[in-house]
Image (cartoon, rainbow, N blue to C red):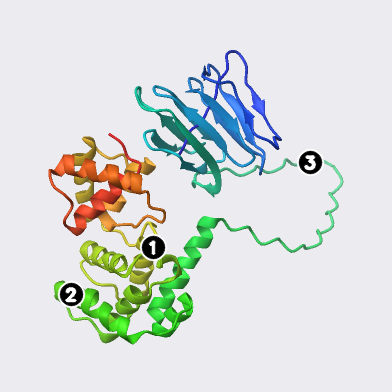
């Protein structure tokens, strides 16, 4: 979660209803909490006391923050919104949330080049505890009985607006059911024609070795599902090549000790391919990943911290990022080589590299 709080000495500065970018003071330290409002959606945020930045600009849908070396800033959302962040290369990012707010903290170490960051509050929220209202009191002795109010006229409730996160999850389930349903459903999902030659190549190159290495009997129906997934993919996994989709199956077999066979299994396969937490978890494997986390980051993981938890989950289940960062991957390759004194060679190695590149966890 990302915390951005801007403080001025002795006052609380409020910005609202902005239709054009508005810059706060440049290169300033904020000595009091500062409230700001993103105009689209009237999204209220708070910049924490003690934050520093070169400039902070309130745009129509986001914030533009320029950090110089040695500066840091924290932004809070009482609505516990999630944030997206772009432009980060050297800036350290920490997202957290409590029962009352979510926070995004950004820190750029001394000596690092100035970075321009874009912070966007999302229509997605962290779950937390809430409260309800109380009841009314009674009347005095001898008072006339109350006349019931007329029943309100029923009105149809508008359908709730779904977030992009919810729509993405629905698409995943639609696609996993297509894979489980067979080739016809998969072809309909991706909108392409059958290619038996490509299927045979995918089976020979990817699926047959996977089945052979698993050392278990696999039904022809389950083998066909794996071939269809590797060869044709689904709408949300077309960004991956056949080899990467096969890699998802290897990750599944590695953590669960078996190949996907049930609808729940395929739900998790497509989730993993889309960087989503699987619903079937393996505590022993996550414990092993926590040991690896400590080797990488020289500390125990804090599973309440989004970045630490993401690193452990990626190492365990091999989640594939939806949006890859080649800059992050190159930096992660150097980190991996420094820690392990070699290049990644195994499936686990590549999961570790992705965790370093994409989780946002820091030492």
Q: Is residue 95 visible?
A: yes
Q: Quadrant of the C terminus?
A: top left
Q: Mark on residue 139? A: 3
Residue 150 is left or right of residue 241, and the answer is: right
Q: Residue at x 35, y 61 (%)?
A: 272
Give the mark nearest the N terminus, 1 or 3.
3
Q: CA distance from mark 1 to mark 2?
A: 23 Å
Q: Nearer the viewer, mark 1 or mark 2?
A: 2
Give the image location of residue 38, x and y in percent.
Answer: 63, 37
Give the labeled residue for mark 2.
209
Give the image location of residue 306, x and y in percent.
Answer: 38, 43
Give the labeled residue for mark 1.
271
Q: Nearer the viewer, residue 237 or 162?
A: 237
Give the image location of residue 261, x and y in percent.
Answer: 30, 76
State the SS at label 2: helix
Q: Is residue 53 above or below residue 180?
A: above
Instruction: Using a 10 Å C-alpha cutoff, classify the residue at mark 2 as few (fewer than 14 neighbours), some (14 to 19) or many (20 or more).
Output: few
Residue 13 is left or right of residue 118, and the answer is: right
Q: Residue at x 35, y 74 (%)?
A: 229
Q: Quadrant of residue 7?
A: top right
- Contact (Cβ within 8 Å) of mark 1 with mark 2: no
Q: CA distance from mark 3 to mark 2?
A: 79 Å
Give the mark nearest the N terminus, 1 or 2.
2
Q: CA distance from mark 1 to mark 3?
A: 57 Å
Instruction: Using a 10 Å C-alpha cutoff, classify the residue at mark 3 as few (fewer than 14 neighbours), some (14 to 19) or many (20 or more).
Output: few
């Amino acid at each position: 979660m990302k915390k951005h709080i801007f403080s001025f000495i002795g006052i609380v500065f409020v910005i609202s209803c902005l239709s054009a970018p508005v810059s706060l003071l440049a290169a300033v330290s904020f000595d009091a909490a500062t409230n700001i409002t993103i105009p689209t959606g009237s999204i209220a945020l708070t910049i924490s006391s003690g934050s520093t930045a070169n400039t902070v600009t309130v745009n129509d849908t986001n914030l533009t923050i320029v950090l110089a070396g040695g500066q840091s800033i924290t932004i809070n959302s009482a609505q516990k919104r999630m944030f997206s962040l772009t432009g980060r290369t050297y800036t350290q990012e920490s997202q957290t949330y409590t029962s009352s707010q979510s926070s995004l903290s950004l820190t750029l170490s001394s000596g690092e080049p100035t970075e321009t960051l874009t912070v966007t509050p999302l229509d997605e929220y962290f779950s937390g505890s809430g409260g309800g209202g109380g009841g009314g009191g009674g009347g005095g002795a001898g008072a006339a009985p109350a006349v019931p109010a007329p029943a309100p006229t029923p009105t149809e409730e508008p359908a709730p607006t779904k977030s992009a996160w919810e729509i993405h999850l629905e698409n995943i389930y639609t696609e996993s059911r297509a894979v489980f349903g067979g080739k016809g459903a998969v072809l309909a999902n991706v909108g392409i024609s059958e290619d038996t030659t490509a299927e045979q190549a995918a089976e020979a190159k990817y699926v047959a070795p996977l089945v052979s290495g698993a050392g278990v009997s696999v039904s022809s129906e389950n083998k066909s599902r794996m071939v269809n997934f590797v060869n044709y993919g689904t709408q949300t996994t077309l960004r991956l090549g056949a080899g990467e989709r096969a890699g998802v199956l290897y990750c599944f077999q590695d953590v669960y000790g078996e190949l996907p066979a049930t609808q729940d299994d395929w739900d998790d396969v497509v989730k993993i391919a889309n960087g989503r937490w699987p619903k079937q978890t393996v505590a022993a494997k996550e414990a092993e990943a926590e040991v690896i986390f400590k080797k990488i980051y020289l500390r125990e993981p804090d599973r309440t911290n989004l970045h630490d938890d993401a690193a452990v989950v990626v190492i365990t289940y091999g989640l594939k990022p939806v949006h890859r960062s080649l800059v992050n991957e190159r930096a992660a390759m150097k980190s991996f080589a420094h820690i392990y004194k070699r290049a990644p060679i195994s499936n686990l190695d590549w999961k570790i590299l992705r965790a370093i590149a994409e989780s946002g966890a820091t030492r």
